[in-house]
Image: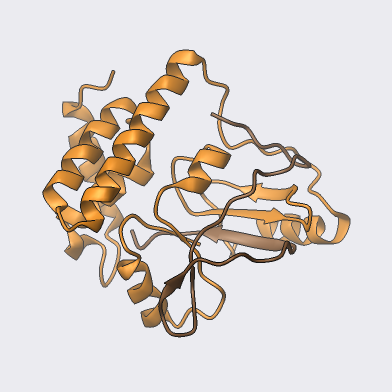
Amino acid sequence: MAVEAGTGARALRYVEEYGVEYPVLLDADNTLAEIFGFKAIPNGVLLDEGGRLLWAEFSHCNVEDKNQIEGLKEAIQVGQSAEAVTAAEEEGELGKALRQAAKALYNLGQEFLVKGNTQKAIEAWQEALRYEPDSYLIRKQIWALRNPERFHPTVDYDWQRQQLERETQDERPF
Amino acid sequence: MSIIRIGEKVPSFQLPYLNQDGRWESDGHGAKKVFLFMWGSW
């Protein structure tokens, strides 16, 4: 599942370049983030035929991690994993209101992006970050638009770490 | 923010998928056991 704002063009390019053969969905509105409460990727979840959560790994799902693969296999065979996994901490009313405000601004930015107004999209997402400064989903969308060379053909994670340090020093979250 | 615990039912959702012609298409699908891996190009 590609968590990607916009029309899906970037995700499509990735699919073609890497020869992805499994079915690919596009989550442009962060629908799954709303459901599970995650703020970063990569994530992996296993659902059964009834839509019940059997296994989950958030923010650092790694198909090369033997422990994760064993847990996933167990969940497939047994029906669910042995440990409960939660994606987010409990939030109060203020936290909920801040997240909803961030979501509304994210959606506004998404609309601007689809209509081709990149600058307005970035402005809306920057405002969204003030309400949800720990959302990598929002932050990286801004980075990818402003600095595409840092994401293709390879992702520069050192640059992302340095950029995060620079930005969080200057930000004024609520 | 909702917390989905193991064994709990996930709210239903519908997202566009990539069809064989390379286009994003919205369509209903039957329920299956499914592994979702969420990634981004960033």
Q: In the rendering, at what x and y percent does residue A71 appear?
A: 74, 54
Which chain, by letter, is brown?
Answer: B
Colour chosen for chain A:
orange
Q: Residue at x 20, y 27 (%)?
A: A171
Residue A7 sits in which quadrant?
bottom left
Q: Is residue A169 left or right of residue A39?
A: left
Whether residue A159 is visible: no
Residue nearer the viewer, A11 or A143: A11
Q: In the rendering, at what x and y percent does residue A142 appear?
A: 23, 48
Residue nearer the viewer, B11 or A72: B11
Q: Residue at x 29, y 49 (%)?
A: A110
Vertically, is A99 above or below A77? above
Residue nearer the viewer, A120 or A87: A120
In the orientation shown, which residue stands out farthest toward the top? A93
In the orientation shown, which residue stands out farthest toward the front? B27
In the picture, the quarter occupied by the C terminus of chain A is top left
Q: In the rendering, at what x and y percent does residue B19 appear?
A: 49, 78
